[in-house]
């Protein structure tokens, strides 16, 4: 559904367009049903926002002018659209090596353990900058943070295409991880500043659904680029993508919604009533560190997010090799088969975000809306990988992987929402702490899998290890994850 709307300029299916060709949009409707878009930044974002929040667009004839408020009091969904786009680019870039690793392994004569080290090197760089990125986002805002790191990771992708051996490729992967580390703390900061609490889960799901969509779309795209340009050319092309997004971000986004010319008075009041925070002072920042590192709900959330990251990085980095080594699929077949788990996960993530927000709105209970969703989906993921470990049938394996990936990614927005729910003042810094755990998973999942593959010759124990980790996470959530209790205790911090 999302993909189809992202690739069309036809407003009818998405906006329920009812005006005639004579009415038009500034004379832009030519009778064919296609909208003649102007070269204004708002025009571009309207298409993407349509895919994320179709109800957010007006059903009356539109006039694409900033001063007439094209989003009719819903410009915050344009912000979500921009976050959606950069997350798409982010995950295509970081996962691309999984499809090139077979050729890289052959060219540089690497062992399975060495491949695991290269795939895991991203996590090292990620750890180094993700926590600092949260602090920077809290201090200087999401606009500067995301703008700077986007340029740096674009350059890092280009350098990966120049690698001449293990050491240079390893260093380039560390640099890419370091460049992308601050991106999600900054994303969380932007959502916290622009969305009221009851919309944050949906907004985060709208932006974060880009993760599985990027991996689904990236599989055939990256495979095709490797076929056309080789793995080196593929890295260079992907490095350019972020530079297309950057001008839109710099023009349209403001850290303070009240400073945006595109926000209506009604929307400005809605955002202001949600208690958006400004920059955090140094004294308040020191006071908050003890809270971030000792609150039971946050600690349980950190470990659950580590398990989420372990599943994500395992499948993101090793799935193509697993399908090749275990079932003899070639690159083009792998690119097609890999689409199914990630597309299913995209649907599950959107549904998960909406269920979480609606449960919160109906019950006012954060444990029911956040904790139980995370625990249930991780239990399903644990059960789903067990038959994958034991089967030799590709159909059963792909079915189990699809369920596991969808279940693991479904509560992605809830992890972020818990941080904002419990410690809104320190949202970006808390997200930085949580993302350190995620980054650790980004290093450990590929490296441990490579080591297990080196010593055992198959992927069985890698899948069983994921089942054990998810089970431990579920137990921790049920015992320690009590956002209602900690939210009340920390109120006013």
Image (cartoon, rainbow, N blue to C red):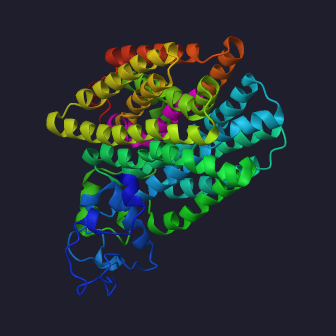
Which stretch appears magenta? 419-441
Characterize the magenta stretch by its predominant secondary structure.
helix
Residue 110 picture quarter: top right
Q: Is residue 126 left or right of residue 356?
A: right
Residue at far right of view: 164
Q: Is residue 139 left or right of residue 223?
A: left
Name the spot of residue 8 as percent of width and height, x first: 39, 65
Question: Vertically, is 156 above or below 321?
Answer: below
Q: Residue at x 37, y 17 (%)?
A: 474
Could you tell me residue 145's position as x and y percent?
55, 53
Q: In which quadrant of the rendered view does residue 491 lie? A: top left
Res 438 seen here: yes
Image vertical order of residue 31 relative to residue 470, above or below: below
385 left or right, relative to 55: right
- Reply yes or no: does residue 481 show up in magenta: no
Residue drawn at x 42%, y 27% as measured from the top left: 399
């Amino acid at each position: 559904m999302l993909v189809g709307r992202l690739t069309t300029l036809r407003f009818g299916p998405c906006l329920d367009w009812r005006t005639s060709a004579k009415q038009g949009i500034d004379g832009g409707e030519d009778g064919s049903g296609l909208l003649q878009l102007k070269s204004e930044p708002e025009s571009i974002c309207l298409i993407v926002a349509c895919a994320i929040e179709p109800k957010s667009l007006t059903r009356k004839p539109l006039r694409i002018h900033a001063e007439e408020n094209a989003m009719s009091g819903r410009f915050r969904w344009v912000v979500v659209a921009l976050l959606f786009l950069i997350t798409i680019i982010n995950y295509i870039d970081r996962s691309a090596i999984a499809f090139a690793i077979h050729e890289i392994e052959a060219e540089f004569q690497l062992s399975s353990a060495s491949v695991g080290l290269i795939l895991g090197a991203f996590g090292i760089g990620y750890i180094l900058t993700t926590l600092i990125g949260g602090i920077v986002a809290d201090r200087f805002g999401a606009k500067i943070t995301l703008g700077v790191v986007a340029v740096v990771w674009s350059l890092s992708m280009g350098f990966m295409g120049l690698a001449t051996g293990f050491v240079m490729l390893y260093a380039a992967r560390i640099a890419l991880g370091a460049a992308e580390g601050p991106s999600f703390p900054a994303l969380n900061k932007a959502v916290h500043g622009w969305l009221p609490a009851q919309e944050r889960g949906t907004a985060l799901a709208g932006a974060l659904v880009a993760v599985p969509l990027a991996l689904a779309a990236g599989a055939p795209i990256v495979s095709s680029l490797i076929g056309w340009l080789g793995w080196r050319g593929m890295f260079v092309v992907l490095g350019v993508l972020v530079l297309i997004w950057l001008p839109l971000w710099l023009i349209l986004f403001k850290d303070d919604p009240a400073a945006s010319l595109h926000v209506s008075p009604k929307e400005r009041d809605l955002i202001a009533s949600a208690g958006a925070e400004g920059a955090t002072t140094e004294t308040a920042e020191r006071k908050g560190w003890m809270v971030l590192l000792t609150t039971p709900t946050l600690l349980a959330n950190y470990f659950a997010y580590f398990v989420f990251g372990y599943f994500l990085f395992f499948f993101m980095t090793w799935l193509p090799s697993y399908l090749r080594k275990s079932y003899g699929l070639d690159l083009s077949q792998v690119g097609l088969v890999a689409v199914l788990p990630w597309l299913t996960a995209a649907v599950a993530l959107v549904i998960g975000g909406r269920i979480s927000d609606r449960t919160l709105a109906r019950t006012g209970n954060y444990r029911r809306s956040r904790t139980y969703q995370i625990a249930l989906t991780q239990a399903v993921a644990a059960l789903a990988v067990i038959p994958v470990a034991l089967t030799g049938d590709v159909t059963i394996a792909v079915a189990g992987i699809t369920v596991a990936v969808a279940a693991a990614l479904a509560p992605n927005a809830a992890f972020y929402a818990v941080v904002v729910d419990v410690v809104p003042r320190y949202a970006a810094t808390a997200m930085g702490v949580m993302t350190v755990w995620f980054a650790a998973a980004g290093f450990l999942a590929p490296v441990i899998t490579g080591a297990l593959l080196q010593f055992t010759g198959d992927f069985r124990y890698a899948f069983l290890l994921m089942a054990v980790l998810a089970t431990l996470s579920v137990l921790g959530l049920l015992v320690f994850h009590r956002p209602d209790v900690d939210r009340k205790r920390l109120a006013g911090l």
